[in-house]
Amino acid sequence: MVTPSGPRNQIIGLLFVGVLMAALDIAIVGPALPELQRAFAVAEHDLAWVLGIYVLFNLVGTPLMANLSNRFGRRAIYIADVGLFALGSALVAVAPSFGVVLLGRAIQGLGAGGIFPVATAVVGDTFPPERRGTALGLLGAVFGLAFLVGPIVGGLLLLAGWQWLFLVNIPIAALVIIGAWRVLPSHAAAATRPFDYAGMLLLAVVLVGLSYALTRIGELGERAGGIVTADIWLTLAVGVLACPALIAIERRAADPIVRLALFRNRQITLAAWLSFGAGIAEAIVVFIPALLVTTFHVSGSTASFMLLPMVLAMAVGSPASGRALDRVGSRAVIVAGTVLLTVALVIEGLLLTSIVGFYLFSVLFGLGLAILLGAALRYIMLNEAGPEERAPAQSLLTIFINAGQLIGAAALGGMIAMLGGGLAGYQFACIAAGSIMALLALLATRLKSRGVELATRRDTSAGGSAA
């Protein structure tokens, strides 16, 4: 049901603040890590779980909250997600032990897992098709903005104590909850089918097993000579072996957590694979600071500042690409994004030791990444999925992006380590990643033309799901 323009402005403003709150948490938690280590006297390798457990529960929370938003309405689940995020934040701030910190981070991750997919589904429910690209572009710009202001906000709050990095979320969450209760639509499913407990459990096993194993492999890949340990083999095997069982369960489920039927739609299948590639592109960012330290012999803090042009390009590129979606359609925008990523990585691979080449790479790469991770792929999902499939389709996209990040980090780390961790390793990784982006550009040309997309958009806005 399309909402009039006045309330739509209130809705997008509210969704923007909620998504920004969750995105800022990722950007500002870094400064808290040394303080947490001192406060709880934990080893550095244990400290990695502050981020790791958040990511794991975020992965599990995404499909769960998408399913629940269909059952109980977008408003109820968005409020619940923001409430969970605030509860987890409060728990971390008052934690008497490191175990309670991790519990709070898990609750934060669970809530954050639903905030962005549900917000995106709300855009599909309330915005007319010709305005969805612009709205999604604004939401996508949140992440670039968060990484711009996050370190500054984190540094200021840290002066008052690390607890304030988490306590600041509570008043923001309270305002979002009050606003959500007033302006968000609350349409729940007329008839509730049995919840897919078996599918949810198996999906959690797959996601946790694969993400743990691939994250550990990626860490080992960054260190030449790393040995894959028994725990990695075990969790990897469990995650892989659970996949066929998950597919079998989901094919029979009345209301599946993973909507396999979505893959009958070629446009959605293409978008899923493109999102996987976007995840690989995002994984590249993890290695850039180390590349700068190795190539230009700068400090780690200087390397972080050198990423500013990329972050600015992402902050500008997301809303700009969102407006372009409403004018020229998804195929042209996504092809442009994948070509930008390809050219950027080839430039970096060929001009590895050039500072001018690096900054040119940064701007082109930031723009391309903003297009793929911002509005474009989510725009396709909203156009192709029916009302009850909007939130599950968005969660599917998030899962594929995260899978690309994990596999990309493990593969790129392995390439760099295989060639000794020096310039040759980074150069090989850039060219390999550029080749993958070139394949994505070819894949993007198979998306629907603007004319066909407009026809599909009219069909789905009437309540159907296009094939």
Image (tube, rainbow, N blue to C red):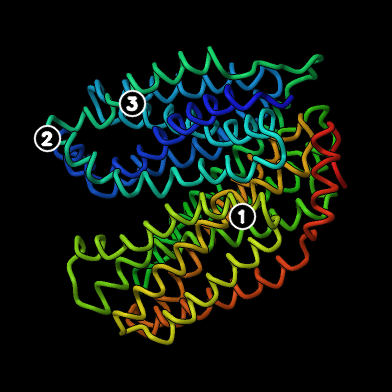
Image quadrant where residue 117 sits: top right
Residue 150 placed where, x, y %? 29, 43
Mark 2 or mark 1, whichever is nearer to me? 1
Q: Earlier in the sequence, mark 2 or mark 1?
A: 2
Calculate the distance from the C-alpha at mark 1 to the C-alpha at mark 3. Answer: 33 Å
Indicate the amino acid at tag 2.
Leu
Please determine whether, in this image, residue 86 is positioned above or below residue 136. above
Front residue of 30 and 45: 30
- The label shown at residue 362 is none
Indicate the amino acid at tag 1.
Ala
- Please name the residue shown 24% across and 72% down the image: 293
Residue marked by disc 1: 324
Front residue of 423 and 379: 379
Q: Would you call the spot at circle 2 few (<14 residues within 10 Å), some (14-19), or many (20 or more)?
A: few
Count of numbered marks: 3
Q: Is residue 80 left or right of residue 174?
A: right
Residue 252 placed where, x, y %? 85, 34
Residue marked by disc 2: 159
- The label shown at residue 169 is 3
Calculate the distance from the C-alpha at mark 2 to the C-alpha at mark 3. Answer: 17 Å
